[in-house]
Image: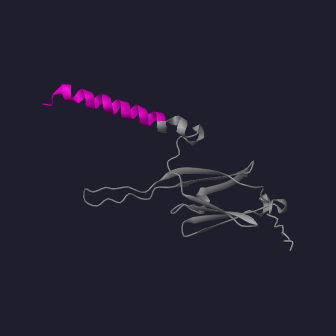
Amino acid sequence: MADLTLLRPIQELKKEMDRIWQDFFGKSWLPEKWEGIEWIPAVDVSETDNEIIVKVDVPGVKPEDMEISLSDNVLIIKGEKKKEEEEKKENFYRMERYYGSFMRSIQLPCEIEEDKISATYKNGVLKIILPKKPEEKKKVIKINVEK
């Protein structure tokens, strides 16, 4: 049987580490609205002169299980990756892939032409094209150099 006097410092250290972890990554770390979200897909956001392009890795998610909306210049992508049939072989079971609902909200850097937004889905990647409003497009000013 283990000596209880040796376990006490280990238990106290574990309690302190748990408290530090909770303080750092606790509920205040994620917004309240994210509670219950099971996974968060990776996102790339890029910009050209005419549009913002958002690519989201959502392998295994059907397009009909996703919803895209724009509100106050924030792009919101919600969806759900549903579990497949569990595969069991002998007495071995392993599950490393994420399932469940997800949500991403992305603050856009400029105003968007909402009626011209398009989205495509190919090979597990959702691609959203958000055309900029004409007044948001970058204007290039030529600089004349005097000789």
Asked if residue 55 is positioned above or below residue 37 in the image, the reply reads: below
Q: Residue at x 51, y 63 (%)?
A: 59
Left/right placement of residue 91 relative to residue 77 reads left
Among all residues in the image, which is located at the extreme front?
A: 147
Closest to the observer, 118 or 141: 141
Rendered location of residue 66, percent (x, y): 61, 57
Asked if residue 12 is positioned above or below residue 140 in the image, the reply reads: above
Left/right placement of residue 53 relative to residue 145 reads left
Q: Quadrant of the C terminus?
A: bottom right
Among all residues in the image, which is located at the extreme bottom?
A: 147
Rendered location of residue 115, percent (x, y): 79, 60
Res 53 quadrant in image? bottom right
Q: Which residues are magenta?
A: 1-23
The answer to whether residue 42 is magenta is no
Q: How is the image coloured?
A: one colour
Q: Residue at x 46, y 54 (%)?
A: 98
